[in-house]
Image (spheres, rainbow, N blue to C red):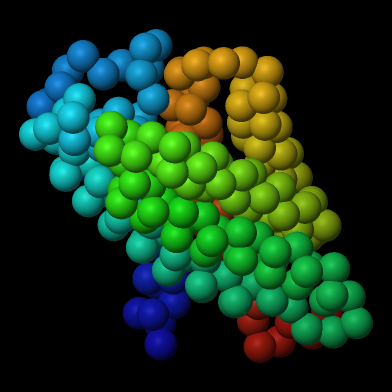
Amino acid sequence: MKFINYILKYAGVAAIPVYIIFTYASHIHNRKINPLEFWLSEYGNPIFNPSGAVIYNTGCVLTAILLAIFYIGMYRWYRRGRTARRFNIAYMAAQASGLIGSVFVILTTIYTLGTDNQMHSIFSTANMIAMDFFLSFTATGFLMNPKIHKSVGIFGFFASAFNVVTMNAFSDFYISEWIFFLLFMIYMILVAVQYEKLAVQKTDVS
């Protein structure tokens, strides 16, 4: 049981090096891709990056699976007692958003840039929205939780707000996607650090 809990706790953090390693391996095949001129999805474009697309898309699928495992493990955050409802609603909404987002990530690897731009754009945007919901709902739960440092929740709201603003206020602001993914990675590390305070123990009844 401890091993399973360990996997549930660190799966989200493990997704970070997996994504970075596969992205870098894909980058080697097309060094023209950069944060100022291209979306990250260009790494998975089989036309623009024929040798590296499979590598990047494989990394995205593995990342989505690891994140899904982490999201499933969020059931350990559910609380019991009279004050539990406000926490559980926030965490359940975040959990659902994260799992849906993982599905969208996998769909972006099926409908890639270069082969089906329209469907890729739909699923990519849907994933970004799902990530925003995950950030916002977990941040809400953290701010209500006296055990969690308020800065974690504030950072979650900042990352979400950054993505919302840059997605809607700017067109082809490529670097914003790269920055948002970096912020999301940092947030997942912060959550892992706080995880034991989030995981409800048998003695927690409020």
**Horizontal arrangement in the rendering, residue 30 relative to residue 125 (left or right):** left
Q: Is residue 189 visible?
A: no
Residue 132 image offset from top left, x and y in percent: 64, 44
- Where's the N terminus, which quadrant? bottom left
**Horizontal arrangement in the rendering, residue 78 relative to residue 189 (left or right):** right
Residue displayed at 21% across by 14% down: 32
Residue 53 image offset from top left, x and y in percent: 19, 38
**Horizontal arrangement in the rendering, residue 36 relative to residue 46 (left or right):** right
Residue 64 image offset from top left, x and y in percent: 38, 56
Q: Is residue 181 visible?
A: yes
Q: Hey, which quadrant is residue 152 in on the image?
A: top right
In the depicted structure, whether residue 89 falls above or below residue 63? below
In the depicted structure, whether residue 88 falls above or below residue 40? below
Q: Nearer the viewer, residue 155 or 51?
A: 51
Q: Hey, which quadrant is residue 74 in on the image?
A: bottom right
Residue displayed at 61% across by 66% down: 96
- Where's the C terminus, which quadrant? bottom right
Residue displayed at 15% across by 22% down: 30
Residue displayed at 78% across by 69% down: 89
Residue 118 image offset from top left, x and y in percent: 44, 37
